[in-house]
Image (cartoon, rainbow, N blue to C red):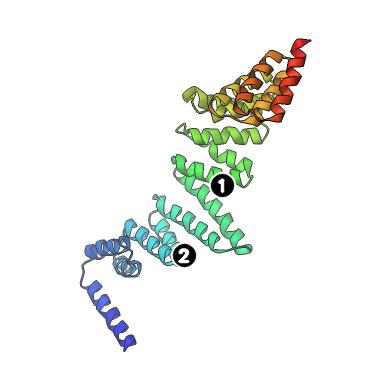
Amino acid sequence: MKKMLFSLIFIFTGLFSYSLDKSELLDEGIYQIQIGNYWRGKEYLEDYLTGEEDIEAYLYLIEADKKLGNLNRADSAALKAIKKYPEDARPLYERVLIRKMMADKEKTGWKKNRYEKEYYEMFEKYLAKIEYADSDKIFELGSIYFNNNLYEKSRDIFIKEKNHDERNLFGAATTYRFLGDYRKAALVYGQILQVNPEFYEAYLGRGASYQQLGDYGRAAKDFEIYLEYEKDINLYIGLANMYINMERYSSAKEILEKAQKDYPASVDIKSLLIEVYSKIER
């Protein structure tokens, strides 16, 4: 009885879809997918695509298959859309998302590695296709590479930024620093601060770059500015030691006294202060 009822429902649904004209099939298919009836929506859109072409139909069909877990079908639909609409970048980005979903489904093994490799390749291809016009997507891929310690790849993505997005400029500066190009890093951190002096993380990055270059005066100045925004006991101690090494004991005393107010229980700060007081008294 249940099998017969299911068959009747299927037949009724099929007859209902054929009673609609082509434009109604498209509209109804999109509507059904939007409200979560993915199988029903797929049926309408597949009927529509037997005689018509529409990029939105393909995109919603891809979405339905993704929601249903039919990732190979979704990928196949995306490939068809790419061939039919080569100027539209959206189907290519759908393939990026599909590869990420495929990789996430695999816990380990060669399949996971393959899907991740294809994900990166497709993501870069997508960004190139849109001529790196999407700062959010640049940040997304650049951050993934950075977090996986792929600093050269990360830099190559971040430096494509065209709209002066501070996140991507900061990413470029930081990858330059991690790659040992401290002059370039300091320059790009400076570009951020010229536009937005309140982007205080850039002071820390530029200070670290100056320190690596041996420009301790500029490094100390940037570290002090950073500490006005964000307290950090390790930076206090590092800055004090820098001043001590430069024999600027008064500056070391001043920064350590500030540090002691913020971290009154710190034994390290107290010990450094005693050392500095002794040097000043000589």
- Taking the image as shown, residue 222 lies to the left or right of residue 39, namely right
| Disc marking residue 71 | 2
Q: Is residue 230 above or below residue 57?
A: above
- How crowded pointer 2 is (Cα within 10 Å; few <14, some 14-19, many 20+) is rated as many
- Which residue is located at x 58 percent, y 55 percent? 117
- Residue sitting farthest toward the right: 282
- Which residue is located at x 67 percent, y 24 percent? 239
- Please provide percent x and percent y for residue 69: 45, 66
Q: Nearer the viewer, residue 48 or 52?
A: 48
Q: How many angstroms separate mark 2 from mark 1 (CA)?
A: 23 Å
- Residue sitting farthest toward the bottom: 1
Taking the image as drawn, is residue 264 in sight? yes
Taking the image as drawn, is residue 131 in sight? no
Q: Nearer the viewer, residue 280 or 110?
A: 280
| Disc marking residue 201 | none
Q: Which element is circle 1 on?
A: helix
- Residue sitting farthest toward the front: 265
- The nearer-to-camera label among 2 and 1 is 1
- Please provide percent x and percent y for residue 95: 47, 57
Q: Is residue 71 above or below residue 100?
A: below
- Which residue is located at x 33 percent, y 86 percent? 2
- Residue sitting farthest toward the top: 282
- Please provide percent x and percent y for residue 21: 21, 67
Image quarter where the N terminus lies is: bottom left
Q: Which element is circle 2 on?
A: helix
Residue type, numbered disc 2: Leu
Residue position marked by numbered label 1 in the rendering: 144
Q: Is residue 33 above or below residue 221?
A: below
Q: Is residue 239 above or below residue 50?
A: above
Number of numbered discs present?
2
